[in-house]
Amino acid sequence: MIVETKSSPDAARLVTPTMLVLWLVLATVPLWITRIGLYPYLGIEILIWSLYALAFNLVLGTAGLPSFGHGAYFGIGAYAFGLCQLEIVANLWICLIAAAAVAGLAGVLVALFISHRRGIYYAFMTIAFGQIFWTLAIKSHRITGGEDGLLKIKRLPADFGLVSFDLTDNVAFYYFVLAVFAVGTAALWRLVNSPYGRVVAAIRQSEVRASHLGYNVWLYKVAVFALSAAVSGFAGGLFAMAQLAAFPDVMSLHQSGYVVMMTLVGGGLVSFWGPVIGVFLFLTARDVIGALTNAWMLYFGLLFIAIVLFRPEGIAGAISAAVQQHSLGALRQRSTSAMRLLFGSGR
Amino acid sequence: MFDLLPHLLNGLTLGLLFALIALGFMLIVGLMEQINLAHGSLFALGAYVAMQLTGPRPPLPMELAKAWLALPLGWRYAATLIIAPVIVSLVGMLIELCMRRTYGKDPLYGLLLTFGAAMVIEEMIRLVWGTRDYVLQVPSAINGGFLFGDLIWSTYRFYAAGIAAGVIGMVWLLIEKTSFGATVKAGAHDSEIVRALGINLSRLRLLVFVFGTMLAAIAGIIVAPIWGIRPHMGVDAVIPAFLVIVLGGVGSFWGAVVAGLLVGLCVGLAGAYASEWSLLSMYILLVAVVTFRARGLWGKKSVLEA
């Protein structure tokens, strides 16, 4: 849609070096996060929202479809997780699968209505459906608890048959979420770099061209939206566990806008890792600037405007440009010194 | 049938208000092919500025403030209807100057820029006025209610609907019947030719944006006594505005007006029978229409679809 992406040299790998380094760094977080005045819960939030933003970027960045009501699927996942736990069966795996399945189903339903649309009409249909789900969540007091939220959600133990881990502690839960995040990022990386992901990226560049090549564009659009909704719902289930409750506010237009912001600020349009950078920046800024002033959204809003105006490819884009420039500069320096050597020898 | 009449009337007045709210948004979408998500915040800003101007403590030097307060409320209100939009339009001007950088790029950038602007304006409002609710004072002539056929009708609603109809008519005249409107439309259609004819397109776009901003502020002032003034009113306005435009179809003036009336009727009737779900009804209306009509009711092809 906006910027061409080059295929990474790591496209064929299951686990890339970046991924490994990121996982390792993240694994050390609980060791030092309290020393710098933050707390492990922030780490949990960042991981869950990163997974959500990565899922969202499947639609926005990979497929180039402007979805502005994605909070709905995150919220539906959270409710599905809670309701499955409270009403059906209190098993972590079943509840997480239920969260992804219900959100994915909602995604399929919406995608059926919107996948033959493009641009502004697509964007607004996603907003409309987002608002519909949000209103339903607020008004159905008996099922969702309305604005008070669905309370008393527990962090179920992670049962692996032989061993079972208790996740009530924030550090233990952090490691569980990190493990899920690791699997999730590897899976999404595979997906984006699979033949399927290539076709979706081709659709972003030109729907007409993709359909003339014989691909069923409509079906691909439905599938990518549903997949993204399912992973968002899965992240929502984790979020319900983190918060010990499910609230309707993540489904509101504001919060759906935030995930768009995070993804773009980070550079989701040019980089797979952009959404993660954006989430990290957004949530850390919320806590750090938010501790100093109530109007932290004001400053983040100004930063967002500056990024849209001057670095529309986001932070990831800025970083890669800086790296390129740096290596270009180094190259130039090397060539000038080589020239000097040549001239020197010539004299 | 007679029971239904008040609800229908209520829906129609509401519909005119929705059309008024959407008007500035429509102007900018239709003539500049830019989505101004800050529309709602500018709408709220208009209401806040008007409240401050007509309230007991206008932001003026001592002497001037005294003279201003000595005027009857009616005059102050009428003056505010002009002054407040002018003040708000300065903010709009600033947004347009920033937005220039995004012209010719993907329309997503303009949308995101104005989303950021909306956030900033809303936070500014919270900083200056806090989160409490305010009331906009209106002259007693248009306040209160009257009896008609055993029912009490709010005078203000009819006044507001009248103003809305008047403003809609004026905007239509401006776009369709003046050379300004013709130039602007031509600029949206083929900017290169318009530039080649020696017309300063950047100034023209700035004017359109300022005009759209003023319409947002006027809508804010008119709607404020009905909705109340609070920071969230911007979001409450921009979603229906967006909805009305998409339902009516991008680029269609009467499409937007008819869509506004439809949405008003829909919300009004739903409010009468299932008030809990009245807001849901407009989204369902939109989904029902756009599922079958790709470009809303009378939309034209635009770059926003790409």
Image: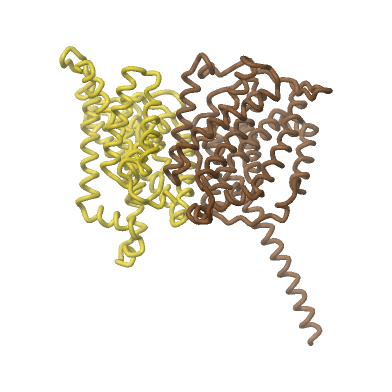
Chain colours: A brown, B yellow
| Front-most of residues A265 and B282 | B282
Residue drawn at (65%, 20%), measured in percent from left and top? A244
Q: Specify whether residue B104 is in view.
A: yes
Q: Position of residue A5 (x, y in %)?
A: 61, 55
| Front-most of residues A105 and B14 | A105
Q: Specify whether residue B210 is in view.
A: no
Residue A293 quadrant: top right
| Front-most of residues B44 and B241 | B241
Residue drawn at (35%, 48%), measured in percent from left and top? B209
Instruction: Name the residue at the front extreme.
Output: A214
B239 lies left or right of B261: right
Instruction: Name the residue at the top extreme.
Output: B150
Q: Position of residue B55 (x, y in %)?
A: 33, 27
Residue A290 quadrant: top right
Instruction: Name the residue at the right extreme.
Output: A162
Residue drawn at (57%, 30%), measured in percent from left and top? A103
Q: How many marks?
A: 0
**Residue B131 drawn above or below residue B91:** above
Q: Position of residue A217 (x, y in %)?
A: 51, 48
Q: Quadrant of the C terminus of chain A?
A: bottom right
Q: Position of residue A3 (x, y in %)?
A: 56, 55
B143 lies left or right of B99: left
